[in-house]
Amino acid sequence: MGIPATFALALVVLPVVGLLVRSDLTRLPSLIATPSSWHALRLSLVTAALSTLACVLLGVPLAVVLARARFRGVRLLRSIVLLPLVLPPVVGGLALLYLLGRKGFLGVLITALTGESVPFTTTAVVIAQTFVAMPFLVVSLEGALRGSGDRYEQVAATLGARPWTVFRRVTLPLLLPALGSGVVLSFARALGEFGATITFAGSLEDVTRTLPLEVYTQAEADIDSAVALSLLLIVVAMLVIAVARPRSWEGGLR
């Protein structure tokens, strides 16, 4: 197993090494410490945090329904929920644009009620990130719920616990390890989101230009800056995973 494992590891590590070899480490601080880079980093962290919160608020109930529901068509519903995992992000961005844009059927309603347009705003960035990141959370939670079964919930219900009490005292504790891994995966996916964001939200500096979009912008003007920002994004993602990763990923052992 060691030989294919080595090739797999090389496939992940060597591209990062290629970035390091290409970068000018002596100029790295100056290339990163530009106003546009810090604005993009701050916007990425804020929007990724907001989209992760939205994933939790919406994804936890959805995962419980998918894991516990017995109605006909739940398999089709699960396939639809997981669709963003396999869709090209640009397709997802177009779908959001034609849903919430000025000519979309929900966009027309929103504009009529509020006078505002959703696309090409910071809100659009959060929506795009939530769209692509939420399936990671749902997959983690649904797998945990289906693996644990529902016997504990049934016992609590037979003892007279109300549905909300069963969810709060039984279901939610069962979800906590998977919730931790799902939150980390969702945040990391939102942090690196590009295709749906640029299609639905555009690349407006200080408004929608997140760090991946800043890398793309700099790649057309200054490749050294693009490489430096790519390394910055890799470091931030690794820090998020290393700091927030739950112990359950390592079997409870260091």
Image (cartoon, helix red, strand yellow):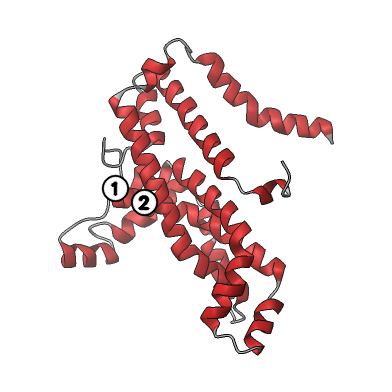
- Contact between marks 2 and 1 (CB within 8 A): the answer is yes
Using the rendered view, name the quadrant where residue 26 is placed: top left
| 45 versus 222 height, above or below | below
Left/right placement of residue 248 relative to residue 208 reads right
Q: Residue at x 64, y 31 (%)?
A: 12
User: In the rendered image, is residue 75 in sight?
Assistant: no
Query: x and y percent of residue 7 in the render?
Result: 74, 30
Query: x and y percent of residue 108 in the render?
Result: 22, 64
- Disc 1 marks which residue? 122
Left/right placement of residue 183 relative to residue 96 reads right
Q: Residue at x 51, y 52 (%)?
A: 87
Q: Residues within 10 Å of mark 1 (few under 14, many from 20)?
A: many
Quadrant location of the C terminus in the rendered image:
top right
Q: Is disc 1 placed on a helix, strand or loop? A: helix
- Disc 2 marks which residue? 126
User: In the rendered image, is residue 190 in sight?
Assistant: yes
Q: Amino acid at mark 1?
A: Thr
| 223 versus 56 height, above or below | above
> CA separation, marks 2 and 1?
7 Å
Left/right placement of residue 231 relative to residue 14 reads left
In the image shown, does 70 or 63 lie closer to the viewer?
Answer: 63
Q: Residue at x 41, y 23 (%)?
A: 226
Q: Is disc 2 placed on a helix, strand or loop? A: helix
Q: Residue at x 37, y 47 (%)?
A: 47
Q: Residue furthest top?
A: 26
Q: Residues within 10 Å of mark 2 (few under 14, many from 20)?
A: many
Query: x and y percent of residue 186 in the render?
Result: 51, 50
Query: x and y percent of residue 135 in the render?
Result: 53, 57
